[in-house]
Image: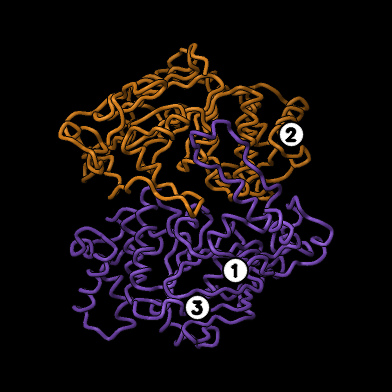
Amino acid sequence: MTEQRPLLEVTDLVKHYAVRGGVLRRQVGTVHAVDGVSFALGAGETLGLVGESGCGKSTVARTVLRLVEPTSGAIKLDGEDIAPLSKTALRPYRRSMQIVFQDPFASLNPRMTAGDIVGEPLTVHGIATGAKKQERVAELFQQVGLRPDQMKNFPHQFSGGQRQRICIARALSLGPRLIVCDEPVSALDVSIQAQVINLLIDLQRKQNFSYLFIAHDLAVVAHISHRVAVMYLGRIVEIADKHELFANPRHPYTQALLASVPIADPKAKRTAPLIDGDVPSPINPPSGCAFHTRCPYAIDRCKTERPMLQAAGTAHQVACWLNDGTGRSE
Amino acid sequence: MSEAIPAETVLDVKNLQTVFFTNSGLFRAVDDVSFSVRRGETLAIVGESGCGKSVSALSIMRLVPDPPGRIVGGSVTLEGTDLLKLDDAAMRSIRGNRISMIFQEPMTSLNPVMRIGDQIIEAVRLHQKVSSKEAWKQAVDMLRLVRIPEPERRAQEYPHQLSGGMRQRAMIAMALACRPALLIADEPTTALDVTIQAQILALIVDLQQRLGTGLILITHDLGVVAQTAQRVIVMYAGKKVEEATVESLFETPLHPYTRGLMASIPAVPSPDAKADVRLVEIPGMVPSLTRLPPGCAFAPRCKLAIDRCRQEYPPLDEVKSNHWAACWRAGEMAEAS
């Protein structure tokens, strides 16, 4: 990736939710949903965000778009920090950031025609009306592999894969520079997933926007991304070029995650031992390195001091005391 | 349990037909499907939504909602008894006892206002004459068997106090409490995270082998199939289109649909495969069961389709030894590979 100024630069992003209890609804705890996340995303690049449920990957996505207000941290889009902007000041930036959600059944208004859904952002931002809008919508339909004569149909007349295409067309309508995809294919059948993944890749090659791509399926993320960040309990534990990450995972959690993926080959053997236990609660995350409670290699230092992301080879950063660029942990 | 002959057939399903009567017409959710499961064996049923894999399982359990669904033909023989001929009371004594089932979402299949231990006891005391004290002991033992830490304490807790993985373990404990001959797991790990999925699958396979249970694993994930099953059947639009041992299926899939599925899943990148290969798409979508085309249901999406495919449904032939496929061109594919 060309390393000029990145399109998106997130620094020390934090999102805490208050847990209230008792009659007086006093704050009794804090959910550390996102706990100091930093990354950069270049133009035309895809950054994959993986992790298990509750690791904060969706919260990162929504906070970047300001759909969720960050507790602290900076979100720079093209060098401009959008975190402190007011709603009105934010509006012009909204055009360049769009999102595709997981469930194409829930994210389309059942009472609007597909054409109206895709055309709505054009009206809202005052870009096109009337025949010009219809023309633009028809063009978007073709780009995502739908027929323009389907514009008058309602969402229930489409299959799951086609509905996701409508969501993608809507996201494309304003010519965004960043599209956040939050589990865009996990609700789809296997044979349809490939169609949507190929479409997303083709669109990016033609239009050169960036994706922040979130999924729990590592193979899907690896296929579409240029770089991959692994999250655990609100923090990025490892971030690297995808080939580097899969060939040479340095964080014990990444290693466990990769070893857990069932491989579609009966001859393949599992390589690393499985990790035990469940992800701890983000309300009281463990001290030091959040992974130390499940880590087979944890040392005393892991329990007290939090490791920061450190360079470990080219385009590879890892947050682990045993992996300070000296090699793997075993 | 485990001293039985390993090759013994536990379940034999023959020509099962389950139909649904809906406003848009009759559709055949399961159309003439046969398979068998041996003691200690894992049979995977693979397919996409609407292919009939879950309805097959519900038919075995006799849990198909009637109306609109009805089992209209075939036989389901469990340990020598045809379940389709039993009355409701006799079926109830088998369900949860000789066959049990684990569902996808553990939170919705557990009773939220009952302690975990009591839910396991319920299954035990329904089928066995034991005191409640003895049953509680069994429940705790089952929780220990599924490797829930501190089983005595956990048995006292309610489902919401357990994590997703722990709840699925509790479901497994409940399902295996009466030592069933057959366990049906319908997408048991789809709602779970990948590290938890690996734990649960390892647990199911380990217990199944120790207890000698036959297992039907319903899934859409070919990776899960490859890592856990011995035999696989692939379903498409209500019909069985391919059956083989797991090795044979992954080595030479003989139905174009199976081939398409395998090519459409992205592989975890390996260092030697530097270039990004484009995923192979299966064009179109799964057909609606009320408007199936004549001939092979997959023909409209199939690259290899010839005129014959559009007119006649292909028979399920043993193309290679122990490898069946319902495709007019399976023979050619077997020779080419």
Residue at which label 1 appears: B322
**Residue A237, relative to residue A258: is it above or below?**
above
Residue at which label 3 appears: B11
Instruction: Tell me the orange chain.
Output: A
For residue A67, what is the image quadrant?
top left
Query: If the image is split into quadrants, where does the C terminus of chain A sit?
Result: top left
Per the image, label 1 sits on a secondary structure element best described as loop
Please tell me how crowded label 3 is: few (under 14), some (14-19), or many (20+) other residues with Cα within 10 Å.
many
**Is there CB contact under 8 Å for labels 3 and 2?**
no
**Residue B250, relative to residue A19: is it above or below?**
below
Question: Would residue A192 be found to the left or right of residue A239 on screen?
Answer: right
- Judging depth in this view, the residue of A34 and B330 nearest the camera is B330
Per the image, label 3 sits on a secondary structure element best described as strand
Q: Amino acid at mark 3?
A: Leu
Of labels 3 and 1, the one closer to you: 1
Q: Amino acid at mark 1?
A: Asn
Label 3 or label 1, whichever comes before in sequence order: 3
